[in-house]
Image (spheres, rainbow, N blue to C red):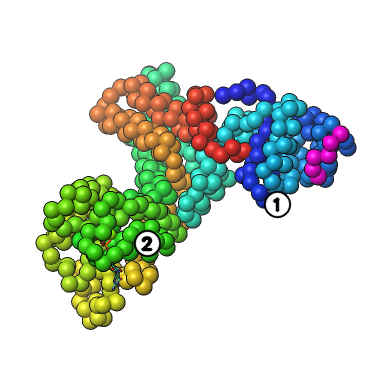
Amino acid sequence: MNNINQTIVAPTTNISTQAISLIRISGDDSFNIINKLLKKRITETKNVWVRKLYDKNELIDEVVLTSFVAPASFTGEHVVEIACHGGILNTQKIINLIIKNGARMANKGEFSQRAFLNNKIDLIQAEGINDLIFAKNELALKIGVNNMTGVHNQSIINLKTNLLDIISRIQVSIDYPDYDDVEGSSVEDLTTALRLINNEVTALLKRSKMAIKNANGIKTAIVGKTNVGKSSLLNALLNEDKAIVTDIHGTTRDIVTGEINLENISLNLIDTAGIRKTNDVVENLGIEKSFKMIEDAELILFVVNKENLNDSENKEIFLKIKNKKFILIFNKSELISNEEKIQLINEYENIVFTSAINNDIEMLLNMIERLYFNEEIMNNDSLILINLEQISLVEQIKNKLEQALNAIIFGVPIDIINVDLHQAWEFLNQLIGEQYEEEIIDNIFKKYCLGK
Ligand SMILES: Nc1nc2c(ncn2[C@@H]2O[C@H](COP(=O)(O)OP(=O)(O)OP(=O)(O)O)[C@@H](O)[C@H]2O)c(=O)[nH]1
Ligand SMILES: [Mg+2]
């Protein structure tokens, strides 16, 4: 990481041909640097200014400046934001001018990193910003906004307070062993208090693990016999002619992938080669891949046609997917009568009818949303984390709490239990960013966009 005391600059919008570009400067020298480019100076106050920018005497642009005075800014430093005329050349020219006058180019995520280091936001809020920017669906967006604004962060603070309370009770019993009536330090009291914390952490972990799947995308394989309409279904779902479709059996040889974002869930779709007995070497390699995809996928879209449901290939596929989450899709459903449909619905679970050729996939989309609907995460009124590193920290907290609980139950001396609890406490601090290693923090912010 470059020197954190230097004033930095970066475009906060893409550098492209557009009406307005936004450039942000942050650091002690923000006002000095911008004033070098103005004939009419701006003062160190929070304000909005319309000014002409000059490189010495050459007029560069007319811009709107928004200034913030430390510590009342996003980064906690002096910040000047320049709304200049969009255009690749113009934006770059202004940035270069600012660099020439004393700033350096910001690293990715450095504005947020400074906000964190200056205690303007905690780590959960910082990660929330990133979640929001990269959100693929409404659910991820809602979680990002909540976490960025910190609305649920009180729950982590409460967990910390409660855990600290237990640790101090134990400490008192260790320091004053003869004093055995310290309130709340009996084994029963400690176990009860610890269980409450552990329950909350377990619930947070469960919610988060579910939500991260919905947010990042469920690995979804479209499988079935040849010619049932798998590739047509992929194309209908993606609303794009991505995979080749013909009436020749064995059209798809290799996997074709695509992503769709529904309201509360994203799917990473994989179209596979149709399964059949064949002597074609290439096709067989494709079919091997199809079976591998069945193993790897989290959700299987098993496509059949009414007339081939009980064929040997379908029986084989059924056997392979029976312990997995799957939806049985009767494609070419415009050829199925309503009576037949009712009969099939009575016979099978998780069944839907589609007609890929007519773009009729509504029933399938509804079924997917329903399968992954979870009241708790959709309502979003408690903290949810959708970032792998954060979830892994919560997992470690849970492990430590459980170790401590088991140890208490087995009568392990209380000072040993306190070691586990201390570690759980440290992980909690890491989660919110009150305790950190510089390298880890650098890594976290590196995945942010430039200018954020
Ligand atoms: N009538 C009807 N035909 C369809 C429908 N969906 C696909 N088809 C046709 O079925 C044929 C096979 O479609 P594909 O999408 O290539 O089938 P596939 O399952 O990917 O086939 P393979 O790649 O060979 O495994 C094409 O002629 C499609 O136009 C549908 O809903 N109704
Ligand atoms: Mg195909």
Task: Report the magenta stretch's main SS.
Answer: strand
Q: Nearer the viewer, residue 399 or 71?
A: 71
Question: Is ligand 1 within 8 Å of the beta carbon of the residue shown at mark 1?
Answer: no
Q: Earlier in the sequence, mark 2 or mark 1?
A: 1
Q: Is residue 146 above or below residue 391?
A: below
Write down the region rendered in magenta. Answer: 57-62
**Residue 235 circle label:** 2
Are discs 2 and 1 less than 8 Å apart at CB? no
State the residue at coordinates (26%, 81%): 338
Residue 249 visible, this angle: yes
Magenta-colored stretch includes residue 417? no
Identified at 33% across, 33% down, the residue is: 399
Q: Nearer the viewer, residue 221 or 208?
A: 221
233 sits left or right of 36 in the view? left
Q: Residue at x 27, y 69 (%)?
A: 331
Q: Picture coordinates of residue 345 (x, y %)?
A: 23, 72
Q: How crowded is the residue under tag 2: few (<14 C-alpha within 10 Å), some, or many (20+)?
A: many
Element type at mark 1: loop
- Name the amino acid, label 2: Asn
Up the image or down, 364 lies above or below 40; here it is below
Ligand 2 resides in the quarter of the picture at bottom left
In the picture, residue 71 is in which quadrant? top right
In the image, the residue with mark 2 has its CB under 8 Å from the nearest atom of ligand 1 = yes
Q: Residue at x 36, y 26 (%)?
A: 420
Q: Quadrant of residue 400?
A: top left
Circle 1 residue: 19
